[in-house]
Image: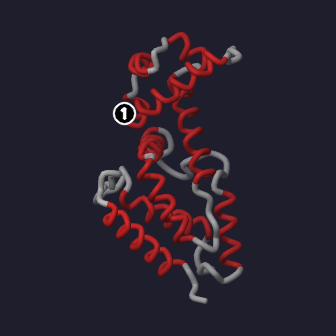
Amino acid sequence: MPIAPTRRGEATRQRLLASATAEFAERGIAGARVDRIVAAARSNKAQLYQYFGNKGRLFDEVFSIHIEWLIAEVPLDGDDLPGYAVGLYDTCLQRPELVRLAAWMRLERNPFGDLLPGDPDAAKISAIAAAQAADHIDPAMDPADVLSMVTAMALSWSPASLQVAASVDDADDVHDRRRGALARAVRQAFIHPR
């Protein structure tokens, strides 16, 4: 039975989540070790298991928190698809663990189909469909496919890139060049000229 968190208990829980984020992002679900997580969190296995049940449920909690944060942090406006793509680029640049966690989820849990159960992208797909109905975005493509392609374009320089992984240490002009190229590519691929 989960315990009701006290202020001190909530601080321990947050340290465990932060430590688990780093461990899972670096090593994946199978490679993550509870011993390293609790040591980095200055906690113990009993507390981890009491809060989260097991390592798999801990990963699920970490992943869920990061996806909810991403959805809230980078909303999609159907009238500014290039802006959404650039927002994703910037977010993944600042929070590379998001991409790493998603990559591990894809590799170890959901190799096919939707990455997440349910429909967390429903609002974004609806925004794209509305922009298509207004003839702002090319209506010839399925809105879910548009979202997938724009996301893939935005992740071109992410830690999961097959070419070049961006770093916050890259020069500002390099980031500006990538942002400009990304916005231009999304505009040319999906936006109907007015």
Q: 117 or 45, which lies in front? A: 45
Furthest residue toward front: 172
In the displayed structure, 118 sits above or below 135; it is above
7 relative to 25 in the view: left or right: right
37 relative to 125 in the view: left or right: left
Q: Quadrant of residue 171?
A: bottom left
The quarter of the picture where the N terminus appears is top right
The quarter of the picture where the C terminus appears is bottom right
72 relative to 92 in the view: left or right: right
- Residue drawn at x 58%, y 21% is 11
| Secondary structure found at label 1 | helix
Amino acid found under the numbered disc labelled 1: Arg
Q: Quadrant of residue 26?
A: top left
Q: 105 or 4, which lies in front? A: 4
Q: How would you rate the neighbour count of disc 1 (Cα within 10 Å): few for under 14, some for 14-19, many for 20 or more?
A: some
In the displayed structure, 85 sits above or below 131; it is above
**Residue 104 in the image: x percent, y percent?**
43, 41
Q: How is the image coloured?
A: secondary structure
- Residue drawn at x 48%, y 53% is 91
- Residue drawn at x 68%, y 71% is 129
Furthest residue toward bottom: 194
Number of labelled discs?
1
**Residue 188 in the image: x percent, y percent?**
47, 81
**Residue 155 in the image: x percent, y percent?**
42, 59
Q: Which residue is mark 1?
A: 27
Q: 115 or 154, which lies in front? A: 154
In the displayed structure, 24 sits above or below 33; it is below
- Residue drawn at x 43%, y 42% is 97
**Residue 109 in the image: x percent, y percent?**
49, 39
